[in-house]
Amino acid sequence: MLAQTQVDFGPALAALTAVLVVAFPISVSVTKVVDFIRNLFGDKQPNVPSWLWNVAAFAVGVGLALGWGINLAGAVVQAVPALAENTMLNGTAGTVLTGLAIGGMSSFWHDKMAAWAAQHGNVGPVT
C-alpha cells in the first residue's frame, strides 16, 4: 500500500490565484495599449514588421510591472518549498520576468479579441 502524505497547497494556490487575478487583466490592458500604438502609427507605416508589435507588448508589460512593482515570479518561486530560499527573483529580475510574461500573454488576448471581432463582423480577418 502506498503511504499517504498531507500536502499543503495553500501557498501554491495563493500564487496561482495571484497570477490569474493580476496577470490576466493587466495582459488585456497591454493588448489594448499596443493596439492603440498600432492604430496611431502602424496604419501609416504598412511595412512595419510584425515582430515589432511583439517587442512593443513586452516593453509595455515590463514597463507596467516595473511601474506598479508587480512581481508574480517571485511569489510563484516562494510558493515552491524547494525554491523558497532562492531570492534571485525577489527583486527587479522577478519584476522584469513578470512583465515579460504579461507581455507574452497579451499576444493571446490580441488574437482572441481579433477573432471575436471578426466573428461578429466588426473588423477584417485576424492579423
Image (cartoon, grey):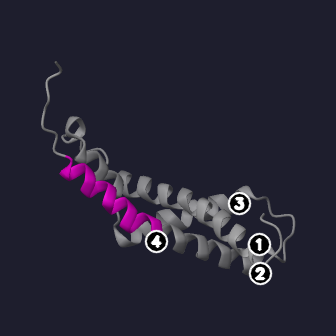
Mark found first going from the N terminus, 3 or 2: 3
Disc number lying in front (4 or 3): 4
Question: Which three-letter amino acid code belongs to the residue tagged 4?
Answer: Pro
Q: CA distance from mark 4 to mark 3?
A: 22 Å
Q: Is residue 2 left or right of residue 57?
A: left
Kindly indicate the quadrant of the structure image that contains residue 88: top left
Q: Give percent across and percent down for residue 62.
A: 48, 62
In the picture, the disc for residue 122 is: 2
Q: Which residues are magenta?
A: 9-25
Label 4 sits on residue: 25
Q: Nearer the viewer, residue 3 or 46?
A: 3
Mark found first going from the N terminus, 3 or 1: 3
Q: Assign the C terminus to one quadrant of the image.
A: bottom right
Label 3 sits on residue: 52
**In this rendering, is residue 41 above or below 50?**
below
Q: CA distance from mark 3 to mark 1?
A: 23 Å
| Residue neighbourhood size for the residue with mark 2, other residues' Cα within 10 Å, grouped as few (<14), some (14–19), many (≥20) | few
Disc number lying in front (4 or 2): 2
Indicate the secondary structure of the residue bearing disc 4.
Answer: helix
Query: Can residue 91 be seen at all in this image of the molecule?
Result: no
Mark found first going from the N terminus, 4 or 2: 4
Q: Is residue 81 left or right of residue 61?
A: left
Q: CA distance from mark 2 to mark 1?
A: 6 Å
Numbered-mark total: 4
Label 1 sits on residue: 118
Kindly indicate the quadrant of the structure image that contains residue 123: bottom right
Question: Which three-letter amino acid code belongs to the residue tagged 2?
Answer: Asn
Whether residues under marks 2 and 1 lie with C-beta atoms below 8 angstroms apart, the answer is yes
Q: CA distance from mark 4 to mark 2?
A: 23 Å
Disc number lying in front (3 or 2): 2
Q: Assign the N terminus to one quadrant of the image.
A: top left
